[in-house]
Image: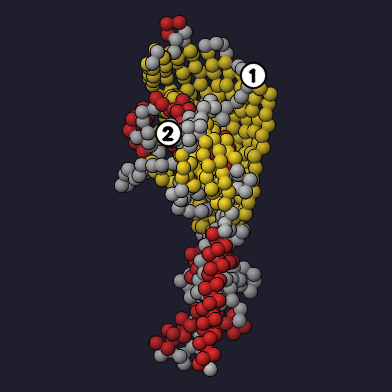
Amino acid sequence: MKYRFTLLKSFSVLLLMMMLTGIAQLASAQTKINVKGVVKDATGNVLPGATVNIQGTTQSTTTDVNGAFKMEVAEGSTLKISFVSMITKFIEVTKNTTTLNIVLEDSNKQLNEVVVVGYGTQKRSDVTGSVTTVPKSRLSQLPVTNVLQAVEGAVAGVTVTTSSSIPGRQPSVTVRGQNSISAASGPFVVVDGIPLTKSGGSLNDINPNDIASMEILKDASAVAIYGANGSQGVILITTKRGTTGKPVIRYNGYAGYENLGHILEPRGPASFTQKFLDYESQNHLTQQFPEPVYNNSERANYAAGRTIDWVKEVTQQGFMQDHNLSVTGGTPDVKYFLSGDYLKQKGVIKGYQYNRASVRSNLDVNVTSYLSVGANLYFANNNYDGGRANLLNATAMSPYGNIYNADGTYAIYPMAPEQLYVNPLLGLTTDQINRSVNISGNGYAEVKFGGVLKGLKYRLNAGYTYLPTRVDGYSGRLANTPLGSATAVSSETNSYTLDNLLLYTRDFGKHRIDFTGLYSAQQRKYFISGIAGTGYINDETVI
């Protein structure tokens, strides 16, 4: 038997070696493709010395005097083609990739892009401060409720933190780190030249589909014109404008499900009872409790084998949908943009939801060759209504507890007589109204001078924002409030902005002058009132 075991063992080792050899041969037999190509610039000139690298490896080559190259590349690899002062290009190799005609764009073109910088625009090549432009693809292609969620991880020096996934909860953002120990460190937000931050509004009020560009001013020189308001950085948002031509109607919508990515798994029934058995054993209480559950209300469920997954009871499959309809068009002298949006999000925790309805209208008119006027009107309604389930309490409940009383209402203490934790679903019995409205309008008038004053223009910006909010709530007997408790809080914010701008831009050969003079006035009035009551005879008489 020993000799037979040795033969079997040797045969197993040989078989294993053959399998490993086959796997190695299979890996080495990965499809190789002979790729050849020519690298040129946008004008058609060949680029000798361009580097062609297989991304993720050290294998690379350079183009010859004719801009040509040849390489043996594994299918599925990515070629990285780069050249000095050119934008690097990436090409994925497929089985049909044999001959490539690669055109690299001049990176200097990016320097001629126009970017928005405090109260005006400049060529990127002329910008001396630290200004970052958020990629437009992130603004329009990501399904987000708040534009900051699209910025997260996309802009260097800007930290966006999503501390909660509650529907409608706005992420926090810092530019170049935390700049204060106790004061707020959020940046100053300006939309179409009118401050949003100081008006009581939030970026939840802005529909991401309406945004044409978004610049972030980060260093001292870039934000200097905003004074103390720019001490934490500045976010400049420009909304979409009308275009010349026939009306163009666009619809953009999406819908999708949301689920918890990492579901917390509390103690299961077996582990839960074992914990109590261990407690009994260590404290010599084995004879005192006939069942391995502590509370009287749990014993019937334990005897019948009924268990509750409390985390499952307070969670649900979330759903999010957004519908945006816009119309744009106009003539060379009159251009318009009109947009309407409706967003609805149901959270993954029961009771949490967020609805937003918004309308935007932008109008630009060239009255004469030297006078232009325009107006922007915006309305947004935010709805955070509803009671909320408690996920924290759900993780502390016994699997043998009781969700309901005999009459079908929620049991206040699922593990009675234990009163440390209340039913995590009690919040669903409360009534809550939590809404805000943002109504804003701003207009401008711009005069351009000619003759010896060519390049000089005067611009007047005027904006007004009205933002009422309402937060009402009632907690009654079903929510463990025996006397009932009601609150009602309302607030109003009225703010206006008036900017007088004198701008001068002129090119003199290779030289350029950019001058901006500003006189600005801002005012904000805030009023809040609230009332609270308790001692209601019953819950039905509360309005």
Amino acid at dot 2? Val
Amino acid at dot 1? Thr
**At 57% across and 57% down in the image, what residue appears?**
30
> What percent of the width, then of the height, locates residue 252?
64, 39
The foreground one among 422 and 36 is 36
> What percent of the width, then of the height, locates residue 338?
63, 30
Question: Which numbered disc, 1 or 2, marks the residue closer to the eye?
Answer: 2
> How far is mark 1 from mark 2, CA to CA?
43 Å
Mark 2 = which residue?
84
Compared across the picture, whether 441 is left or right of 174 comes to right
Dot 1 or dot 2, earlier in sequence: 2
In this rendering, the answer to whether 126 lies above or below 284 is: above
In this rendering, the answer to whether 404 lies above or below 345 is: below
Q: Is residue 344 visible?
A: no
Mark 1 = which residue?
331
In this rendering, the answer to whether 330 lies above or below 82 is: above
> What percent of the width, then of the height, locates residue 217?
40, 34
The foreground one among 399 and 478 is 399
